[in-house]
Amino acid sequence: MADHANHADFTANPAPLGLLGFGMTTVLLNLHNAGLFGMNSMILAMGIFYGGIAQVIAGVMEWKKGNTFGTVAFTSYGFFWMALVGLVSFPKTGLMEATTSGGLVAFLIMWGIFTAILFAATFKLNRATQIIFGSLTLLFALLALGDATGNEAIAHFAGWEGIFCGASAMYAAAAQILNEIYGREVLPLGNPVVKPVALKKVA
């Protein structure tokens, strides 16, 4: 049997693609949440194609590299965006009933819990990733609270916080692209809070 363990990996880093798909779509949606414009086809199209499909592709590429965190994060959030577009679009076709306020709150809470789990894992990753997932956990909490209470001020505040979250993902993507291209640290990503423990090889 051929030994694949020593084969060099020359495939591209998929993280910037996933981060930009997530970040740009998140910024655009939260410009809406902040009250700057209504829900429109621009947001829905971004949710399907860039926030959705592009992130799923990035997740599959992370799987190829053996990165469990990247696989779970990008694939899950890619399908999150497609599910969100479905929640908005399907009732307009008459195929499904619109989601109740309580149902949407439950949807946001589940994604908040999922994100909090990933946030706990980021303490062994770089600071930029910690900021993305920490602010995203807060965003889901604010969105759920805003929908549960019907408080427009909370919803608008969530929008501005979501713009920060999306922008932080775009920064992390830019840092990875520029640092790789220039072969040096152009934009810092920050060191992890907890240093990874080296795994011992099993004979």
Image: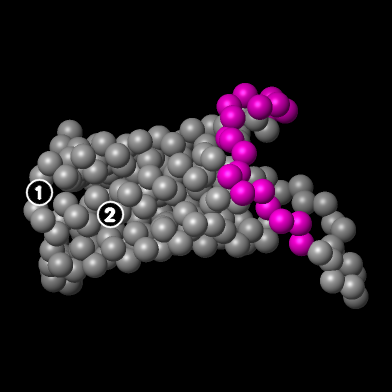
Residue 140 vs 190, above or below: the answer is: below
Q: Looking at this view, is 69 or 94 the one in front? A: 69
What amino acid is labelled 2 in the image? Ala
* Magenta-span inclusion, residue 186: yes
Residue farthest toward the bottom in the current orientation of the protein: 1
Q: Looking at this view, is 92 or 73 the one in front? A: 73
Q: Residue at x 45, y 42 (%)?
A: 131
Q: Residue at x 30, y 54 (%)?
A: 140
C-alpha distance separating marks 1 and 2: 13 Å
What segment is highlighted magenta in the picture?
Answer: 181-199
What amino acid is labelled 1 in the image? Asn
Report crowding for label 2: few under 14, some 14 to 19, many 20 or more residues within 10 A (C-alpha): some
* Magenta-span inclusion, residue 131: no
Predominant SS along the magenta part: loop
Color encoding of the figure: one colour
Residue 130 relative to residue 163: left or right: right
**In this figure, which residue is indicated by the disc labeled 2?**
141
Residue 95 vs 82, above or below: the answer is: below
| Residue 57 visible in the shown view | no
| Quadrant position of residue 181 | top right
